[in-house]
Each structure stands twice: as C-alpha cells, then as structure tokens.
Image: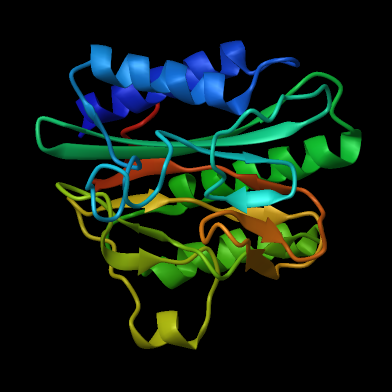
Amino acid sequence: MRRAGRVVHSVLQRCREICQPGVTTKEIDEEAQRIIDDAGARGLFKNYPTYKPGEGFPGTLCISVNEVVVHGIASDRVIEDGDIVGIDCGVQLDGWCGDSATTIMVGNVTPEVRKLCETTQHVLQIAIENIKPGRRWSQVARLMQQYAENLGYGVVQDFVGHGIGQKMHEDPKVPNFVNRELLRNDILLQEGVVLAIEPMCNMGTKAVKTLADQWTVVTLDGKPAAHYEHTVAVVPGGAEVLTDGN
C-alpha cells in the first residue's frame, strides 16, 4: 500500500507544479493519467463504479474548483489566479490501493480562503496525531469536528472517509464528525487497520448539492470548499501515513 501511496503522492506533486493560471483541468487530468500509466498502476476513479469503458466517472482525477466540494470532472475549464483546486487521486498497484487528496491554492488566494484550506489541512493532521491503537474513532472525529466548527466552518456530513486495502472503498465508513450512527457503530482502532481519512470543510454552510451530471458536488451557498485526504495505517503507538511519499 505504501508503494501505491507513492504513486498517488507523485501525481499530486505534479499537479501542484502544473496547476497554474491558464491551464485547463483536462490538461491536469491527462498528466495524471500519464504518471499512473508510467508507474504501472491503475487509476481507481476512471469509469468507477463499474470500471466498464464509457461508464461511471469520466475522469482520472476528481478535480474540484472553488465551490465544488468533491467529484469535480475535468473539462476545458481554465484555472484562474485566486482559485483553489481540490485534486483527489486513487490508484491500485499490484493489488493494493492508495488514496489521497489536496487543495491547491493558485496565485493570489484571498486570506479568508487560504485560512479555510489551512484549517482543513490541520483537521486532517489532528486525526493523524490522535490515532492510537485502542482508541475509538469517535474520539478522533470529535476533535476534528470541534476544531473546524469552532472556527466557523461547515463540516460536510454527506461524504465520509472509508476503509481501504485491496479495494478503494472498504468498511468501515469514517466520518469527520460525530453522530448517532457513529456512536452506535464506533470503530475500534486496531493495529493493521488502514483508513482513508478525508475532511471536507466549507466556508459557509455544511449543506451541499449534486449537480445534474450526477457527480459534481457543490456547496449549497456557493462558497468555497476545501478537501484533504491521506491513507493512514494504525500502527503500534500511533499512525503511519502511506501517501506522504516516503
């Protein structure tokens, strides 16, 4: 899984380099596919969930600009100065999966939007720092939720993280918040468990809607959203990030 994670990390690093004003999201998507192919890996998003050609999700990456929370589709849309661009990438290599996301701040991003991105990234870091064998996930999720909400951000609850291994989406569901369902079915963090943890925070309301393409999810109030993700293993004494390039 770490080898798969290195491929994902290399894709995201390249996306950071080329995500500049004047570049289209389609050009970013095509470059990601090239890197995945060169690594001998398989992208996990293209044609998901059927994986039949021409069915399912049409892109190699989920590319989500500004008010798009997740599942944005690459197109001829041109990146502009001040945009934030969420890039989510998943690959399978030799039967094992890696999944990670980042939000790229392009050029002169406003201080308010920059703070949103930095806060969401820190929410992910809170999770990584607080994972320990024997803890319940609700203990971690509560810390994540409280940090974001105390700063006034909407914590998206329509989409959650997930277990990951030989398939991209495995049990359990991994929310970035605490609700009755989580408390009824809490996750015991044990050594060897691997989770894809992906907080999503909105500048305004936590409410979202899905557009007519049945994939693109946007904030209900049109304000910006940020999304960060790592594949994280529970190990003796804490957590090990498998998508950090190491």
- The colour mode here is rainbow
The quadrant the N terminus occupies is top left
Residue at x 48% of width, y 43% of height: 229
Q: Say whether residue 44 is left or right of residue 206.
A: left
Residue at x 31% of width, y 33% of height: 242
Work out whether residue 111 can be spotted. Answer: yes
Q: Quadrant of residue 106?
A: top right
Q: Quadrant of residue 8?
A: top left
Q: Say whether residue 208 is left or right of residue 37.
A: right
Residue at x 66% of width, y 33% of height: 85
Total numbered badges shown on the rendered structure: 0
State the residue in front, 94 or 112.
94
State the residue in front, 16 or 46.
46
User: Considering only vertical position in the picture, is 36 above or below 93?
Assistant: above
The quadrant the C terminus occupies is top left
Q: Can you give x and y, in whole percent of width and height, for residue 207 in the image?
A: 70, 70
Q: Can you give x and y, in whole percent of width and height, for residue 196 in the image?
A: 37, 50
Q: Can you give x and y, in whole percent of width and height, for residue 120 in the image?
A: 65, 46
Q: Residue furthest left?
A: 94
State the residue in front, 94 or 74.
74
Q: Say whether residue 74 is left or right of residue 224.
A: left
Work out whether residue 245 can be spotted. Answer: no
Residue at x 10% of width, y 30% of height: 94
Q: Quadrant of residue 240?
A: top left
User: Considering only vertical position in the picture, is 137 above or below 98?
Assistant: below
User: Considering only vertical position in the picture, is 135 above or below 43?
Assistant: below
Q: Can you give x and y, in whole percent of width and height, for residue 169 in the image?
A: 28, 56
